């Protein structure tokens, strides 16, 4: 399990598995309200539950330095959520692949429909990318719906985690294209949004010009991992 120092607290650390445990707790907490009351808990209810649980359960067996102390109250501070910026080419993103891992990729270019994205052969327990893996694809490039995944967040868990100002599409995308049309009238759509006619034979092995959903991306990754 990875551990790292808490910012500005050199003697305090946090780890991947610890954050996962807390995330599971929060999901279970919310699930109980939804299951029995048909709604999500309020922030006040979460704050009160944490205060009560910490006061009753946190002692010197749970945390150091608690031999003569007790927790009186847990206070949750809020702030206005930062404005969500529109995804743009060059943005590095993370997405939850399963309960243990995040996958990573980069938005490459805008098309008439969606955006081209590359998916890297790298996973992490936290949405923190290792740039040493930025040159290795796990699957061939796909077309994503950035509005649904990153702005509305109506599928899975997709996050923009980095920006690349003045991003230039690498030469390795020169031969990448997506296929649209019907047999006899097939067209290829390049990463730069230009198109040209192709034969059925030339189209073989290339992805269709259509969105890949959260579930479809995960299925493609699962198949790729099985075949590695």
Image: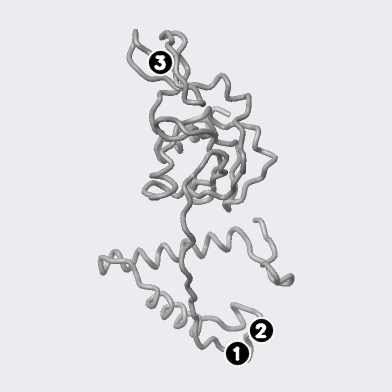
The quarter of the picture where the N terminus appears is: bottom right
**Figure coloring:** one colour
Q: Report how far apart the C-alphas of labels 1 and 2 lie in the structure.
A: 8 Å
Q: Which numbered disc flags the more N-terminal residue, 3 or 2? A: 2
In three-dimensional space, the C-alpha distance between marks 1 and 3, rounded to whole angstroms, equals 71 Å
186 above or below 165? Answer: above
Residue holding disc 2: 65
Residue 32: image location, x then y, percent = 33, 67
Residue at 69%, 71% in the rendered image: 12
163 sits left or right of 9 in the view? left
Element class at badge 2? loop
Q: Which residue is mark 1?
A: 69
Are dots 1 and 2 in contact, CB under 8 Å? Answer: yes
Q: Tell me the residue at 52%/49% (across/down).
A: 160
Report x, y in % for residue 108: 54, 34
- Specify few, some or many for label 3: CA neighbours under 10 Å numbering under 14, 14-19, or 20 or more: many
Residue 227 picture location, percent across and down: 54, 27
First in residue order: circle 1 vs circle 3: 1
In this figure, which residue is indicated by the disc labeled 3? 187
Element assignment for label 1:
loop
Displayed quadrant of residue 119 = top right
Farthest residue, direction front: 166
Which residue is more in the foreground, 33 or 184?
Answer: 184
């Amino acid at each position: 399990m990875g551990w790292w120092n808490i910012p500005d607290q050199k003697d305090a650390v946090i780890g991947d598995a610890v954050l996962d445990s807390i995330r599971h707790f929060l999901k279970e907490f919310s699930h109980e309200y939804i299951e029995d009351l048909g709604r999500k808990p309020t922030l006040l209810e979460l704050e009160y539950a944490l205060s009560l649980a910490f006061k009753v359960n946190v002692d010197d067996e749970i945390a150091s330095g608690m031999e003569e102390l007790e927790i009186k109250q847990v206070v949750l501070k809020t702030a206005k959520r930062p404005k969500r910026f529109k995804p743009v080419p060059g943005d590095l993103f993370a997405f939850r692949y399963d309960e243990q891992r995040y996958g990573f990729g980069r938005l490459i270019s805008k098309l008439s429909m969606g955006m081209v994205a590359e998916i890297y052969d790298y996973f992490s327990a936290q949405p923190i990318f290792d740039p040493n893996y930025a040159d290795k694809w796990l699957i061939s490039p796909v077309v994503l719906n950035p509005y649904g995944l990153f702005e509305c967040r109506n599928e899975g868990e997709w996050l923009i985690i980095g920006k690349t100002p003045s991003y230039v599409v690498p030469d390795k995308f020169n031969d990448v294209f997506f296929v649209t049309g019907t047999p006899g009238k097939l067209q290829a759509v390049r990463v730069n949004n230009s198109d040209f006619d192709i034969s059925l034979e030339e189209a073989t092995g290339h992805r269709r010009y259509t969105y890949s959903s959260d579930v479809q991306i995960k299925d493609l990754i699962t198949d790729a991992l099985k075949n590695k």
